[in-house]
Structure formats: structure tokens, C-alpha cells
Image (cartoon, rainbow, N blue to C red):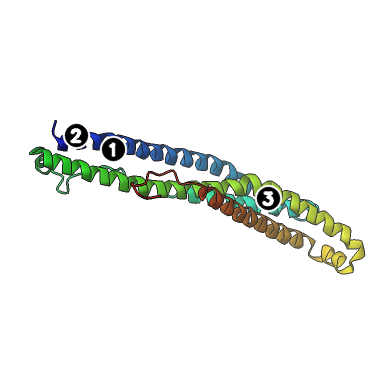
Amino acid sequence: MSDDMRKVERLKSLNAEFRRLIDFHATSFKEIDEKARYWLTASLPAFLALSGYLTNNLDQLGFEFICAGFALSTCLLISVYLFANTLLSLNVESGVLAPSSRSFKAAASVLESDEKWEKLTRQQTDELLRAVKNNETQNALKSKRLKRAEVSLFLAAPTAVCLGAVWAFGYAAAGPFFAPAITLSIIVYPGLAAGAGVLIGGLTVATFLISSHYRTRFKNARGDHTVKPDGQQ
């Protein structure tokens, strides 16, 4: 076997490993979309039902229920947006190198000699590596979008409900000692509770998303699991 053909065989082995990465990213894309679609179908009806209930019964609900309800509704709305954003299509590469003319003659020309076959194999390797890099970037982006949506639904939503209820009870407790609080509760009590709930929900989601962003950056900076050329550290 010539040296050129040995190189070709080794490149084929490398290509098989790179192809496994392409398949891994394709599976990951599918799993992320399935999770986002599942939670979107759960959070969207929940948001619509809760918003409709709060709107129709605003004058009949207690101060703490309005505040906590609108805090939860705000978190659900943000979650719906983030899950929907996760499902947006991204540029995915197959890693397959095809003839520019899409004809058999152009494809068969590489069979004429070992040198042309080796050149094709090298070009295929380059194409696979370019696809791996692209898909890795896109997969990381889609994963980040999903994580943001999960944080807003699973962490921010229950926290916002608790904070909204605590704020409402604290406001009610301060009423007897703070005359304007009593006046406001009588005049614009539902609107005040709803506005406070929206503000609490939005700030809670923002706080959790910022915290999650910095935690993710810290984890990603811990190590590099890529193969480097000789001489590089």
C-alpha cells in the first residue's frame, strides 16, 4: 500500500470520528426541540388561563392573590417567549462534500488516481470539521436558549409567586401605620397589586437569567477538551 493510500485510510478513520460528532449534534438538536415544544404546550395554555382568570376576577380577588398571580403570569409569558425562541431554526451543516456541478462525471474524476482520491479525502475532512464547528456553535446557542426558558419557568416562576405574596402581605401590614397605603388600597388597589406583580415577576426572571448566564460562563471556562496540534499548550 502506498503512502498516499495509508494517509487516505487514516483520514477515513478520522472522518468517522468527526461524523459521530455530526450525528451527536443532530440528536441533541432534536432532543432540545422536543423539550422546548413540550414545555411550550404546557406553559402557553397555563398563561392564557391564568391571565383570563385574573382579568375577569380582578375585583373579587385578594391583594396577595392578585400580586402573586400577575407575578406568575409574567414569568409564564417570558417562558413562552423563550421556549418559542428555542424552536427557531438555525443553520445546520451536514458535512457532506458534493460536486459543484452535481454530475456523475465531476464525481467520477476523483477516481482517476490515488492523488486525486487523497485530495478529495482531505477536502471531505475539511468540510466535516467546518460542519462540526458550525453545529457545535449552533447547538450551544440552542442549548443556551432552552436553559434560559427552563430557568424562567422552573426557578423564577415559583420564586416570583412567593415574593409577590410576601410583598402583598408586607404592604397590607404596613397599611395601618402608613396612611397613603390605606388610601391607595381603596382607590387603585387592584391595579397596584397587578403592577407590583408584573414588576416582581419581570425582575425575578431577569435576576435568575443573569445569575445563570454567569454560572454558565464560569463552567465553560474551566477546561478545553479539544485536540491541539503539536507544540500548542
Q: Earlier in the sequence, mark 1 or mark 2?
A: 2
Determine whether the residue tagged by mark 3 lies in a helix, strand or loop. Answer: helix
Pointer 1 residue: 15
Residue drawn at (88%, 61%), measured in percent from left and top? 174
Disc nearest the viewer among 1 and 2: 2
Q: CA distance from mark 1 to mark 3?
A: 49 Å
Determine whether the residue tagged by mark 2 lies in a helix, strand or loop. Answer: helix
* Amino acid bearing label 2: Arg
Image coordinates for residue 157, horizontal then vertical, percent: 66, 48
Report if the CB atoms under discs 1 and 2 are less than 8 Å apart: no
Question: Residue 210 lies in what quarter of the image?
Answer: bottom right
Residue neighbourhood size for the residue with mark 2, other residues' Cα within 10 Å, grouped as few (<14), some (14–19), many (≥20): few
Question: Residue 15 lies in what quarter of the image?
Answer: top left
Q: CA distance from mark 3 to mark 2?
A: 63 Å
Direction top: furthest residue: 1
Lateral position of residue 36 relative to residue 46, left or right: left
Residue drawn at (78%, 65%), measured in percent from left and top? 188
Pointer 2 residue: 6
* Amino acid bearing label 3: Leu
Image coordinates for residue 125, horizontal then vertical, percent: 26, 43
Disc tally is 3
- Marker disc for residue 72: 3
Up-down relation of residue 16 to residue 167 (above or below): above
Residue 97 visible, this orientation:
no
* Amino acid bearing label 1: Asn
